[in-house]
Image (cartoon, rainbow, N blue to C red):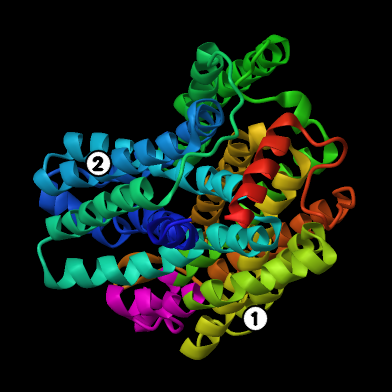
Amino acid sequence: MDRTAAIRNRLTVPVLAFGGILMAVMQTVVVPLLPDLPRLTGASAGTVSWMVTATLLSGAVLTPVLGRAGDMYGKRRVLMAALGLMTLGSVLCALTSDIGVLIAARTLSGAAAAVVPLSISILRDELPPERRGSAVALMSSTVGIGAALGLPLAAVIVQYADWHTMFWVTGALGAAGVTLVWWAVRESPVREPGRFDVPGALGLAVGLVCLLLGVSQGGQWGWGSPRVVGLFLAAAVVLALWWWLQLRAEQPLVDLRLVARPRVGLSHVAALLAGFAFYANTLVTAQLVQAPEATGYGLGLSIVATGLCLLPSGVVMLLLSPVSARISAARGPRVTLALGAAVIAAGYAVRIADSRDLWMIIAGATVVATGTTLAYSALPTLILRAVPAGQTASANGVNVLMRTIGQACSSAAVAAVLVHHTSLVGGAPVPTLHGYLLAFAMAGAVALLAVVAALCIPGDSVSGEPDGPEPAGDRTRGAHDRAMEGA
C-alpha cells in the first residue's frame, strides 16, 4: 500500500465523522435566526417556521430512500450526493432573502439526514472488526456533537455578522465535506443490486409527510382542526396501503419481514423513544435559560450564552463514544442501549431536582447527553448485528427515521405542555417552571420506556455479525477486510 492510500485509510473515520457533525450543524444553525427572520424576510412567523419544518420533512423522507439507494448503487456515491444537496441548499440560502427560496433551499439541505446511516454502512464494509465498534459509536455521536457545536456557532455569527454569512460558512464546510469524502473514502464493494422501488418511495414519502406535518403543525393549526385530523387519517391510510404493498413487492424499499424480527423491530421502537427523550433536553434547556429573570426561575441569558450552556454536552458526547463502544463489545449493545436510556432518565431527575441554578442546569443537560451517547451509539450496532451487509444503509436509514419521528413527537409534546402552563410576565405569556418540570418528567418517563424496549430485545452475540450464516455481501466484505489487513 502506498503512502497516499495509507493516509486515506486513516482519514476515513475522521472524514465521515466530519460529515455527520456537519449534518447536525446544518440542522441547528437556523434555530437562533428564527426570531429575527420575520423582520429580515418580511414573512410571517408561521411561514418562517417552515424553514425548520421543510428540513424535517425532507430529511425524514429521504433518509430511508437514500439509504436504499446507497445499498443498491454505492454508498459513497449517494453520500456525496446527500452532502452536495446540503451544500447547494446552504449556498441558495446565502444568496437570497426571499422566504420561498429559503424554504426550498432548506428542503434540499434535509437530504443530509442520510449522511449518518450511509457512513455507518461504509464503516461496516471498510473497517476490520476491531475498529468498527468505536468508529460506529463516534459516527452515531456526531448528531449530538454537531448540534451542541452548531448552536453557539450560529449564535455568534447571527449576533456579530450578517445572517447570510452563516449559510456561506455552512456552504463552504459542505463543499469541503464533499471533497474530503471524494478523496479519502473508497466506494464500498458491498451492493444489493436490483430495481429501485419507486412506488414504495413515493408511498412512504406521502405517508411520512402527512404524519410529520400533522405532528409538527398540530399546535399551530389546532390538534382537532380538520387539516390536522385529515393529515393523520391520510397518513394512516397511505402507510397501511404502503405496508401491504411492501410485503408483496419483489424488491421492496424497506424489507418489512426484516423489520418484523424482534431484534430489528424493537431496536426501531427504542430509537423512537430515545429520540423523543433526547430532544426534549435541547428544546427545554434553550428556552429555560433564556426566560426573563422576572419569571423567578429564568436566567435571561443571550443566545450566545445559551449555546455555550449546551457546549459541554457536545464535548461529553465526543469523549464518551469510545466508552460506549467498549461497553457494547464487552456486554453487547442491548445492555449499552438500556444503560444509556436509564442515564437519560437520571438526567431528567437531576433537571427536576434543580432547574434554577445554572451549574445544575448544565449538569443535568450533560447527564442526559451522556445517556444519549450510550443509547445512540448502541442503536446502529444493534442494527448491524441483525441485518445482512447488503441492507445496512437502508436498515440504519429506517432507524434514523424512527429517531426523527421521535424528535418531532417530542417537539409537539413539549410545546403542548408548555402552552398549557403559562403565566403573564410583562404582559406576555411565558411558560411556568411547573410546565418545564412536567416536560422533564414526560421525557424521563419515555426514557424509562426505552429501557424496557431495550431489555426486551433478544440477546445479541458479541461477535459483531448477524446471527446465522454469513450473507454473500459479508463474505465479499470479509475478503476485502483481509486484503486491507494484508496491505
Q: Position of residue 380 (x, y in %)?
A: 66, 50
Residue at 35% across, 36% down: 81
Q: Nearer the viewer, mark 2 or mark 1?
A: 2
Quickly name the residue at label 2: 89
Q: Can residue 127 be seen in this view?
A: no
Of residues 255 and 424, which is closer to you in this image? 255
Q: Position of residue 75 (x, y in %)?
A: 49, 37
State the CA–CA distance, disc 2 to disc 1: 39 Å
Amino acid on which disc 2 is placed: Gly
First reached walking from the N terminus: tag 2 or tag 1: 2
Q: In this view, does 161 lie above or below 102?
A: below
Secondary structure under badge 2?
A: helix
Magenta segment boundaries in residue numbering: 286-314
Residue at 17% across, 71% down: 159
Q: Residues within 10 Å of mark 2 (few under 14, many from 20)?
A: many
Secondary structure under badge 1?
A: helix
Amino acid on which disc 1 is placed: Val
Q: Position of residue 194 (x, y in %)?
A: 58, 16
Residue at 56% across, 84% down: 363
- Predominant SS of the magenta segment: helix
Quickly name the residue at label 1: 350
Q: Quadrant of residue 88?
A: top left
